[in-house]
Amino acid sequence: MKTLFLVRHAKSSRDDPSLPDKNRPLDDRGKRDAPKMGKRLAKRGVKPDLIVSSPATRALATAQLIADELGYKRKDIVVNDRLYAAAADDLLAVVHTLDRTRDCVMLFGHNPEFSELANRLSGEIGDMPTCAIAEFSFDTKAWLDIGEVEPAEVTLDHPKK
């Protein structure tokens, strides 16, 4: 089994219009929602083998806050530029290059790309609100199969659920 989590970054601040998009931080709600979602995952026993984040400040901060709740070391989070301002095809290409020995991977990034990829993987998921977590379990041994095989299980969780 391969389990893929797509995590949209938590609510970000637009208070400083001079900041480049990539540097926007989480707002207060985002700082509350990310640990809350991490606690939900921890309660379910989720243990990622790998966390990969967009380099954007808001995505990386979300990844760090959730990682803290899961007992995943912040220093082990991999930052991948391909998760920022990428098309759904580019995101899928990142998934396809994941190490076969990793069975549970979390990607942290942005909309609309994450919603598009989630919808492509399963029509059960439409729009992903901020800090939403889409979870896909696939009955396969290769990440290269993702996008070709139907997920065996799909869930979507978000802070307001």
Image (spheres, grey):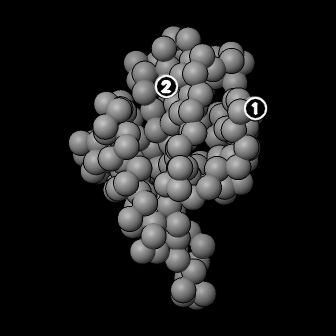
CA separation in Å, label 2 and label 1 = 17 Å
**N-terminal label among 2 and 1:** 2
Q: Which mark is residue 13?
A: none
What residue is disc 1 on? Answer: 123
Can residue 68 be seen in this snapshot? yes
With respect to residue 11, does 100 lie above or below? above
Residue drawn at x 36%, y 48% is: 38
Which mark is in front, 2 or 1? 1
Q: Nearer the viewer, residue 29 or 106?
A: 29
Horizontal arrangement in the rendering, residue 48 relative to residue 91 (left or right): left
Q: Residue furthest front?
A: 161
Q: How many marks?
A: 2
Q: Amino acid at mark 2?
A: Thr
Q: Nearer the viewer, residue 59 or 100?
A: 59
Residue drawn at x 41%, y 57% is: 34
Residue 42 spot, x, y in % from top left: 31, 39
Image quadrant in which you'd find residue 147? top right
Q: Amino acid at mark 1?
A: Gly
Mark 2 nearby-residue class (10 Å; few <14, some 14–19, many ≥20): many
Secondary structure found at label 2: strand
Can residue 113 be seen in this snapshot? no
Secondary structure found at label 1: loop
With respect to residue 25, does 82 lie above or below? above
Image quadrant in which you'd find residue 51? top left
With respect to residue 25, does 150 lie above or below? above
Residue 11 spot, x, y in % from top left: 52, 66
What residue is disc 2 on? Answer: 3
